[in-house]
Amino acid sequence: MKLILLGAPGAGKGTVAKLLTTIDGSVQISTGDILRGAVQTGSELGKEAEAYMKRGDLVPDSLIMGIMEKRLQESDCQKGFLLDGFPRTIPQAEALKELLAKLDITLDMAVNIDVPKDVILDRLCTRRTCENTECQAIYNVKSSPTKQEGICDKCGSAVIQRDDETEEAISHRLQTYNDKTAPLIGFYEKEGLLKTVSGTSSDTVVQELKAPLGF
Ligand code: ADP
Ligand code: ZN
């Protein structure tokens, strides 16, 4: 499957993407995970992206398009991919449309995971992420805690609150989402690719998508 996952920060794009990869071996491509990995390893890309990310601002479109142009041509994408956190702006969506045409790739749909704002806020404040860049497993202190406090179930690394998950950065990210990313819903509706699903439970989102995707 070749999908775009749209939704506010905390809507569950990453969780839904991981569940979908188990259906047909499509790969999850998370620009947030790629960028956090680059910041940790201290690469050029990481150095450029770090300050934007800390503030909860978007990284410039040109950096993101450079990452995605390479990533979409790697061989594991041929089976399919789930774009998680990209595109995030209208210019990114337009550049992606051109890139896909050039690579002769057709999208199945753009899924808008719709979650009420109070649920989003609660989820983001209680979210914890594994600090191991190879893992980046996501937990929630209330709804899906680690078995041992502060230790990742999957890899044993420390589980932390992200720098951009302070209250101030969270409200800035939500504002950025409303201003820059929410307009993509209209963009993909016009393209005839939009499907909106209620995202209160990630399992239900996946169940709802199976039939339209032919699984
Ligand atoms: P979220 O939980 O906010 O969806 P992500 O892990 O997707 O978080 O992204 C974290 C940060 O990485 C963003 O706040 C932004 O600074 C940067 N980022 C990720 N994807 C993009 C993108 N497509 N365009 C610009 N910046 C991005
Ligand atoms: Zn881990």
Image (spheres, rainbow, N blue to C red):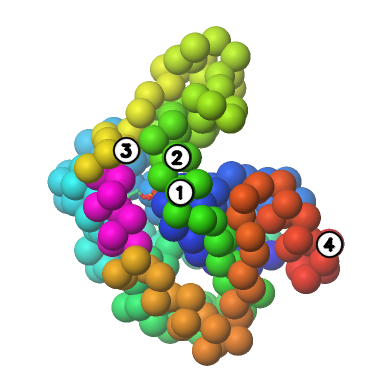
Q: Which residue is mark 1?
A: 118
Q: Quadrant of residue 41?
A: top left
Nearest the camera: 100 or 36? 36
Query: Which stretch is magenta?
Result: 169-177
Measured Cα–Cα span from mark 1 to mark 3: 16 Å
Q: Residues within 10 Å of mark 3 (few under 14, many from 20)?
A: some
Q: Which residue is mark 3?
A: 165
Magenta stretch holds residue 170: yes
Q: Residues within 10 Å of mark 4 (few under 14, many from 20)?
A: few
SS of the residue under disc 4: loop
Q: Main secondary structure of the magenta part?
A: helix
Q: Is residue 171 left or right of residue 116?
A: left
- For the point 28% across and 49% down, the residue is 171
Q: Nearer the viewer, mark 4 or mark 1?
A: 1
SS of the residue under disc 2: helix
Nearest the camera: 182 or 122? 122
Measured Cα–Cα span from mark 4 to mark 3: 35 Å
* Three-letter amino acid code of the residue under disc 4: Phe
Q: Residues within 10 Å of mark 1 (few under 14, many from 20)?
A: few
Residue 53's label in the rendered image is: none
Nearest the camera: 58 or 68? 58
